[in-house]
Amino acid sequence: MDKDTMIQKLLDREAIRDVIARYCRAFDRCDETLLRDVYWPDGTHEHGAFSGTGNEFVDFAMPKIRKYFKKSHHAVDNCYFAIRDDTANVETYITAWHLIPGDEDIVREVFGAQYFAAHEATSAEAHDFIFLGRYFDVLERRAGEWRIKRRVISTEWTINQPSTAIWSDALVAMIPFLGKRDQTDPSYFR
């Protein structure tokens, strides 16, 4: 492989990583515009009960994200790339932590009746839903820009439990900024 080909391959991989990171950021910050921007207009998304276009996914998911998740934090792990010309097949391992409100109806909707019955007595203010899965993406480069053409998400593992997070005392109180789920988050660099 010649030097120019190697450099282009590295540039493509980094641009694709950026698309995947923007998806995670958009989800965690509830940024609908950014989330729509990671998909091509004809791009598709398959995620549990949902199967449709990227735009339809945003319309379907964003109200649920706002309702069910007080906070979320997506972290991208291993990425495997198979890039050929203007198409890339990418498998990305993902770990996502979600803080679910302790509201009885929401706990039942998110975790189901069995989980609710097992944890009802805890009277937890919130619950952790930790998702480990993989993104299977087909990305296309059009006019020099990479975006998702097709995304399928698999579940590998979940951890569901009453949350033990502390948000107001001791060490946490010394950190001046808490993440926000909108454009008041410090990452929007005002």
Image: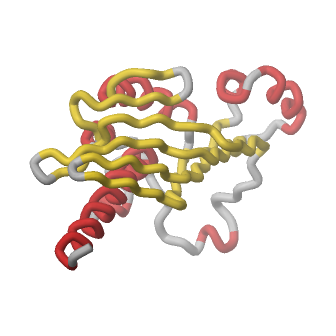
* In this picture, residue 168 sits left or right of residue 92: right
Determine the residue positioned at 64% across, 61% down.
168
Up-down: is 190 above or below 71?
below
* In this picture, residue 52 sits left or right of residue 109: left
Q: Position of residue 146 (x, y in %)?
A: 23, 50
Q: Position of residue 136 (x, y in %)?
A: 47, 42
Give the camera-side residue of 78 and 98: 78
Determine the residue positioned at 36% across, 62% down.
186
Q: Position of residue 88 (x, y in %)?
A: 32, 49
Determine the residue positioned at 40% across, 30% down.
45
Give the camera-side residue of 1 and 116: 1
* In this picture, residue 89 sits left or right of residue 64: left
Up-down: is 175 above or below 109?
below
The quadrant where residue 167 appears: bottom right
State the residue lying farthest toward the bottom.
3
- Location of the N terminus by quadrant is bottom left
Q: Position of residue 75 (x, y in %)?
A: 52, 57
Determine the residue positioned at 57% across, 32% down.
68
Up-down: is 6 above or below 28?
below
- Location of the C terminus by quadrant is bottom left
* In this picture, residue 28 sits left or right of residue 174: left
The quadrant where residue 43 appears: top left
State the residue lying farthest toward the front.
1
